[in-house]
Image: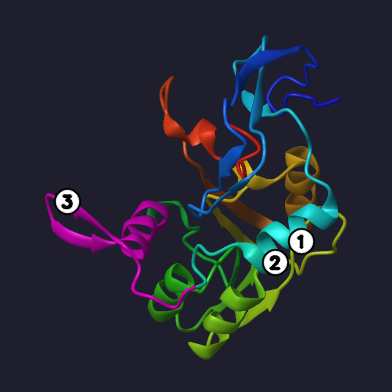
Amino acid sequence: MRLCPITGSDKWQHYYTSKTNRIITGDQRISEGKLEKIICTDSGVVANKRRFTSDELEVLYGKEYELNTLGKEEHFFYTNEGRLSRSEVFYNWILPHLPKKFESLIEIGCGEGNLLQRIKNNFQDKNISGIDGSSRASELAREKGLTVQQELIHGKEDLTPTDVFLLINVIEHIEDISLIISKLKSALNNKGRIIFCLPIQDDGGYDIFFHAHVWH
């Protein structure tokens, strides 16, 4: 039985079932499957009805996931300040939240390293590294000269102690959020910081239709 990561409640009801036998993942792949979402009646959190197994996660993210694995130019946002790359937008968002004094940073789910490289370029005297579940994305990141380990984090792993953990659009993919956060906290150095970015959309947002997103 799922527990709501916000309230700890086990009270769920049906929210959405797809009418076709096709699903779409967050990296925009379409494959066969049934999408079923439930909603916590205490908090309004929406979740996948069925949990992913560890083997399914290894296939989904370690082998098949295509976002940040193609080695192509990242997409751009068109803003009042002009055209900005995705990594620049996220860098500008997180910069005010980085500790004034830190020596090390690990980005979990760093993909091919676009954001990680931007951080590394601006903090060259710091120990900047990343972890990603995709073997292809990790390979692309290392080709850029970045220190990136290929590993899918389930919550049982011992993480390297660091001053900052950074997770950009990752937490919504994680089955056991409380376990992961507990692991991150235990690996933080004194006065360390965890920084999350995650998609939050108003009612009716398309994010709920992503099979690979566990939580909404």
Q: Are marks 1 and 2 in contact (CB under 8 Å)?
A: yes
How far from the left and from the top, in percent, is residue 169?
52, 49
User: Which label is found at residue 62?
Assistant: 2
- Decide if residue 80 is on the left or right side of residue 64: left
Among the two numbered marks 1 and 3 on one chain, the one whose residue lies closer to the N terminus:
1
How far from the left and from the top, in percent, is residue 15?
61, 16
Query: Residue drawn 46% across and 78% down?
Result: 120
- Circle 1 packing at 10 Å, graded few (<14), some (14-19), many (20+), is some
Query: Residue drawn 72% across and 19% down?
Result: 7
Q: In which quadrant will I find the C terminus?
A: top right
Q: Quadrant of residue 103?
A: bottom right
Among the two numbered marks 2 and 3 on one chain, the one whose residue lies closer to the N terminus:
2
Q: CA distance from mark 1 to mark 3?
A: 36 Å
Identify the element where label 3 is drawn. strand
Q: Is 78 in the magenta?
A: yes
Q: Circle 1 is placed at which residue position?
A: 58
User: Which label is found at residue 79?
Assistant: 3
Q: Is residue 103 above or below residue 38?
A: below
Q: Is residue 49 above or below residue 108?
A: above
Give the residue type at disc 1: Glu
Give the residue type at disc 3: Thr
The residues colored magenta run 70-95
- Circle 3 packing at 10 Å, graded few (<14), some (14-19), many (20+), is few
Query: Residue drawn 70% across and 45% down?
Result: 174
Mark in front: 2 vs 3 = 2
Q: Is residue 95 above or below residue 142?
A: above
Q: Is 204 in the magenta?
A: no
How far from the left and from the top, in percent, is residue 119?
44, 72
How far from the left and from the top, in percent, is residue 193?
60, 53
